[in-house]
Image (cartoon, rainbow, N blue to C red):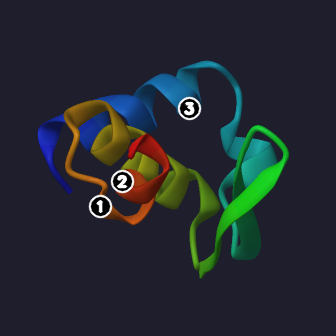
Amino acid sequence: MGTYEENAYNWMKRKGLAPKYEHAGIYCIKIDSYIVYIGKSANMLRRIAAHYANIQMGTEKKYRILDE
């Protein structure tokens, strides 16, 4: 896990999200009212942190088509 991703994860934990999201699950990412991604994870909080970090750093390629 990269530093930015670790920071995002720790920030979410400090905000009290661990009890609600630190478990396995299925999730979707929506932009406006469109579902652009559906995924699953063993630790939802870590996966959300990873998506957030990649979007902020501009390395998340899955959503590039929406920018164009």
Q: Amino acid at mark 1?
A: Lys
Q: Is residue 54 above or below residue 26?
A: above
In this image, 55 relative to 15: left or right?
left
- Marks 1 and 2, Cα distance to the nearest angstrom? 5 Å
Task: Check the image and name the residue furthest to the left.
Answer: 3
Q: Nearer the viewer, mark 3 or mark 2?
A: 2
Pointer 1 with pointer 2, Cβ within 8 A: yes
Q: Residues within 10 Å of mark 2 (few under 14, many from 20)?
A: few
- Marks 3 and 1, Cα distance to the nearest angstrom? 26 Å
Residue 58 location, quadrant: top left
Where residue 2 sits in the image (x, y, percent)?
15, 48
Element at badge 2? helix
Q: Earlier in the sequence, mark 3 or mark 2?
A: 3
Q: Residues within 10 Å of mark 3 (few under 14, many from 20)?
A: some
Observer-nearest of 46 and 27: 27
Residue behind mark 1: 61
**Residue name at image x 42 percent, y 58 percent:** 65
Element at badge 3? helix
Observer-nearest of 8 and 38: 38
Where residue 32 sits in the image (x, y, percent)?
76, 38
Observer-nearest of 6 and 37: 37
In this image, 42 relative to 56: left or right?
right
Where residue 1 sits in the image (x, y, percent)?
20, 57
Q: Is residue 62 above or below residue 13?
A: below
**Residue name at image x 58 percent, y 52 percent:** 45
- Marks 3 and 2, Cα distance to the nearest angstrom? 28 Å
Q: Residues within 10 Å of mark 1 (few under 14, many from 20)?
A: few
Residue behind mark 2: 64
